[in-house]
């Protein structure tokens, strides 16, 4: 039992149990041997055998006990050694811990000292930089102690200084702009007392700065400028906050009236109250003189254009009769002397007759061209489908004789001269059929809306137009085609261009030689009647606005 108490190892306990077992066997053998000696042999195992068994058991007990005790003793010694090692290790660890504690204590004290000194150092350094004019400094201390409060106060002070300097810079910047701007600038109080003026205002009005400061702004306006003198414009300025590009007049020191373009705005405080009225004025004397010159030149141009149109109309009309007379008498002479005329004379007479006919055609073209402006009707709402129906009715024999087919999409109503719109469509469709290819002519008319403008198109499958002619076909008396049989000068497309321009639109063509052409023209959705002067761009390719 004492041996068991020395160890708790399972192997040691097992060996101890074997010793106990052998002891029991030994006790039984000794007991049997003693019983036999006292009472005699009663059968069974002999005394000698029992003695041997007891001796063997005793030997095993001694052997096992020695082994068990040796093992336990060894383990006890090992444990004692371990305890000694642990004790020694504990001493070493304790020493290291003590040294480490001392080290960390010193380091903590060092860094705490630095942490406490750093904000103070930053404050000193920041103060030095601020004193040198560097207002970008900011102390980043977030503690709640006295140093944190001091840092916060320092940062607020720097921000205030920065704002004040920014305001000062802005004020200097604004003052520089005011002083050097080309427009006259006058700043007044809400009751229109002049507070500030710039050099341009003094130069425009002829006053010195001191002569204007404190005066009522109204004295700068002539008596007829009631909208200013009675305060109406200033009421609008106070109500809306601004007035832009209002034409008025300033009165200079020497009494001269100067036209200006007046603009104004208000300055308000944080509560929304008006603190200042900012008034600018631009001298538009040169612009007004240019406008008068332009109006005068435009009127002269209109008169010249009208006179030219009248001369063309009269001349064209008056030339008709002499040409008819020449043609008639030449033909009468040819008929009267037919038997006496040789071949060359007949050819010459033919040239004269053909020449007079071509001249008559050119004169008719001039008349048609001049009538676009001189004889144009007032614009009214026109149903384009009804106009196209009338055009197709008028061209029906020409369409049938050429086995042509004309189709169209739904067409809109536009503000136009119905006679000229009819003439326009008739010329474009007639040309599309006239300049046909090998196949029967196919013509399609359509229209689409594009930003308050109707874009009409007349597409055909004809011969197309060569590149070298596309920029010239809308000019008067230009040939449309180089093909034999179509070499006479044409005025139809020039008339079309003039009609479209009178309606405020443009006309152009897209074509590929041998594959047909598409003529486009634009008419505004709503357009009042124009004057006799043409406007807009015609001819040539479509412009960037259409793209």
Image (tube, rainbow, N blue to C red):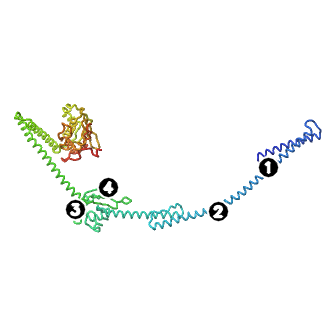
Label 3 close to label 2 by CB (< 8 Å):
no
Viewer-side residue, 367 vs 374: 367
Q: Position of residue 75 (x, y in %)?
A: 77, 50
Q: Is residue 225 visible?
A: no
Separation (CA) of disc 1 from disc 2: 44 Å
Apparent side of residue 90 relative to residue 294 in the rendered image (left or right): right
Label drawn at residue 240: 4
Label 4 close to label 1 by CB (< 8 Å):
no
Q: Is residue 54 visible?
A: yes
Compare marks 3 and 2 and give the one earlier in the sequence: 2
* Nearest to viewer (mark 3 / mark 1): 1
Q: Which residue is mark 1?
A: 72
* Nearest to viewer (mark 3 / mark 4): 3
Q: Position of residue 360 (x, y in %)?
A: 12, 40
Q: Secondary structure at mark 2?
A: helix
Q: Name the residue located 46 percent from the left edge and 66 percent from the top edge.
A: 130
Q: Which residue is mark 3?
A: 257
| Label 4 environment density (alpha carbons within 10 Å; few <14, some 14–19, many ≥20) | few
Separation (CA) of disc 3 from disc 2: 95 Å
Q: Name the residue located 13 percent from the left edge and 45 percent from the top edge.
A: 312
Separation (CA) of disc 2 from disc 4: 78 Å
Q: Secondary structure at mark 3?
A: strand
164, above or below 473, in the image: below
Q: Which residue is mark 2?
A: 102
Apparent side of residue 117 relative to residue 281 in the rendered image (left or right): right
Compare marks 3 and 4 and give the one earlier in the sequence: 4
Apparent side of residue 136 relative to residue 46 in the rendered image (left or right): left
| Label 3 environment density (alpha carbons within 10 Å; few <14, some 14–19, many ≥20) | some
Q: Position of residue 191 (x, y in %)?
A: 31, 62
Apparent side of residue 412 relative to residue 53 in the rendered image (left or right): left
* Nearest to viewer (mark 4 / mark 1): 1
Q: Secondary structure at mark 1?
A: helix
């Amino acid at each position: 039992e004492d041996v068991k108490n020395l160890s708790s190892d399972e192997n040691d306990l097992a060996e101890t149990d074997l010793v106990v077992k052998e002891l029991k066997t030994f006790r039984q053998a000794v007991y049997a041997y003693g019983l036999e000696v006292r009472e005699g042999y009663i059968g069974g195992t002999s005394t000698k055998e029992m003695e041997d068994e007891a001796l063997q058991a005793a030997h095993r007990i001694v052997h096992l006990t020695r082994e068990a005790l040796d093992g336990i003793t060894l383990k006890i010694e090992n444990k004692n050694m371990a305890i000694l090692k642990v004790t020694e290790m504990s001493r070493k660890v304790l020493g290291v811990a003590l040294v480490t504690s001392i080290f960390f204590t010193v380091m903590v004290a060092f860094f705490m000292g630095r942490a406490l000194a750093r904000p103070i150092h930053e404050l000193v350094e920041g103060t030095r930089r601020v004193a040198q004019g560097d207002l970008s400094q900011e102390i980043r201390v977030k503690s709640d102690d006295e140093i944190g409060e001091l840092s916060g106060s320092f940062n607020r002070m720097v921000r205030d200084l920065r704002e004040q300097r920014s305001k000062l810079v802005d004020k200097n910047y604004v003052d520089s702009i005011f002083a050097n701007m080309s427009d006259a600038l006058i700043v007044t109080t809400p009751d229109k007392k002049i507070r500030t003026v710039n050099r341009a205002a003094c130069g425009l009005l002829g006053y010195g700065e001191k002569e204007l400061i404190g005066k009522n702004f109204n004295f700068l306006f002539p008596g007829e400028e009631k909208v200013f003198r009675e305060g109406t414009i200033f009421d609008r300025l106070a109500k809306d906050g601004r007035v832009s590009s209002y034409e008025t007049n300033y009165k200079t020191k020497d009494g001269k009236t100067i036209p200006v373009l007046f603009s104004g705005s208000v300055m308000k405080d944080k509560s929304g109250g008006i603190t200042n009225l900012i008034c600018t004025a631009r001298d538009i004397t040169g612009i007004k003189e240019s406008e008068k010159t332009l109006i005068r030149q435009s009127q002269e141009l209109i008169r010249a254009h009208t006179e030219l149109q009248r001369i063309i109309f009269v001349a064209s009309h008056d030339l008709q009769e002499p040409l008819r007379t020449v043609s008639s008498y030449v033909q009468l002479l040819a008929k009267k002397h037919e038997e006496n005329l040789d071949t060359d004379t007949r050819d010459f007479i033919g040239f004269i007759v053909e020449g007079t006919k071509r001249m008559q055609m050119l004169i008719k073209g001039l008349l048609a061209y001049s009538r676009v402006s001189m004889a144009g009707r007032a614009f009214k709402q026109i149903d384009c489908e009804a106009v196209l129906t009338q055009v197709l009715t008028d061209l029906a024999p020409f369409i049938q004789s050429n086995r042509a087919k004309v189709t169209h999409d739904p067409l809109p109503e536009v503000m136009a001269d119905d006679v000229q719109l009819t003439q326009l469509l008739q010329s474009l469709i007639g040309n599309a059929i006239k300049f046909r290819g090998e196949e029967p002519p196919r013509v399609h008319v359509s229209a689409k809306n594009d930003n308050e403008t109707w874009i009409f198109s007349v597409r055909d499958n004809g011969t197309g137009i060569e590149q070298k002619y596309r920029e010239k076909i809308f000019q008067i008396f230009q040939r449309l085609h180089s093909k034999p049989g179509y070499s006479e000068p044409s005025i139809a497309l020039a008339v079309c261009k003039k009609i479209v321009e009178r309606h405020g639109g443009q006309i152009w063509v897209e074509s590929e030689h041998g594959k047909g052409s598409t003529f486009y023209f634009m008419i505004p959705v709503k357009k009042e009647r124009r004057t006799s002067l043409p406007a807009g761009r015609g001819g040539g390719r479509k412009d960037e606005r259409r793209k």
